[in-house]
Structure formats: C-alpha cells, structure tokens
C-alpha cells in the first residue's frame, strides 16, 4: 500500500505527527505542542478529525486512557516513515526556494 493522501488535512497531520515524534501525547498536549513549535492553534474539530484519519491510515495508534480519561497517541512505524518522507520533501522544496531567492 502506498503512502496515504491526507488531502486538506495534510498540514494538521504533519503538525500532529511532528508533535508525536517528540513522544506520546494526548490531544490537548498535541494542541499545545503544535502551537509551541509552529505557532498554529489547532481547533478541536480539526485536531480530532486529523487524528481519526491518521489512525485510519495506520500512522498513529491510540494507547489506553490515562488519568481523567485522556487517551494518548503514538506514532507507528508507518507513521515514522511517512513523516520522514514528508519532511524530506519539504526540506528539498525549502532548499530550492532559498537558492532561488538568493539569486534575486
């Protein structure tokens, strides 16, 4: 199976995966981390919609609920590979853009 097309949820998905690359987190902690690392505040609908898609594609998995019923998530091996591929592509795009800007 090829890498999933996450459609319009690709940006929140990348933020969520990048957050989870730093360790397992529940939804609120992911929201806080995304705001810290990217200055983006994910709404709860956007967050949990993207989490559902990431789970559906097997990129993350839910862990047993913790205190206060909070359910943490972790990346799967497929999620790690997907994030690595996406970030490498973004890095190549960014490098090209910066090279072109330097030529102006």
Image: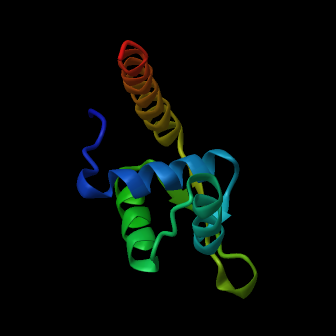
Residue 45 placement (x, y as % from top left): 39, 78
Q: In the shown orientation, is residue 16 left or right of residue 23? A: left
* Residue at the spot 41% in from the left edge and 34% down from the top edge: 86
Q: Nearer the viewer, residue 38 or 1?
A: 38
Above or below 9: residue 70: below
Q: How is the image coloured?
A: rainbow
Look at the image and tell me in which quarter the N terminus lies.
top left
Q: Nearer the viewer, residue 28 or 100?
A: 100
Q: In the shown orientation, is residue 23 left or right of residue 7? A: right
Tell me, yes or no, if residue 63 can be seen here. Answer: no
Residue 89 placement (x, y as % from top left): 39, 26
Residue 46 placement (x, y as % from top left): 39, 71
Residue 25 placement (x, y as % from top left): 66, 62
Q: Residue furthest right?
A: 67
* Residue at the spot 62% in from the left edge and 53% down from the top edge: 37
* Residue at the spot 47% in from the left edge and 37% down from the top edge: 83
* Residue at the spot 32% in from the left edge and 57% down from the top edge: 9
Q: Residue furthest front?
A: 104
Tell me, yes or no, if residue 42 can be seen here. Answer: yes
Q: Quadrant of residue 66?
A: bottom right
Q: Nearer the viewer, residue 64 or 51?
A: 51
Question: How many circles with numbers are drawn on the protein?
Answer: 0
Q: Residue furthest bottom?
A: 68
Above or below 78: residue 28: below
Look at the image and tell me in which quarter the C terminus lies.
top left
Above or below 60: residue 30: below
Q: In the shown orientation, is residue 57 left or right of residue 70? A: left
């Amino acid at each position: 199976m090829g890498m999933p097309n996450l459609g319009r949820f690709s940006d929140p998905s990348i933020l969520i995966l990048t957050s989870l690359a730093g360790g397992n987190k529940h939804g609120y902690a992911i929201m806080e981390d995304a705001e810290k690392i990217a200055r983006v505040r994910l709404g709860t609908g956007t967050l949990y919609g993207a989490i559902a898609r990431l789970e559906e594609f097997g990129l993350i998995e839910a862990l047993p609920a913790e205190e206060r019923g909070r359910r943490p998530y972790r990346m799967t091996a497929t999620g790690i590979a997907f994030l690595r591929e996406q970030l490498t592509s973004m890095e190549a795009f960014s490098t090209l853009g910066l090279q072109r800007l330097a030529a102006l």
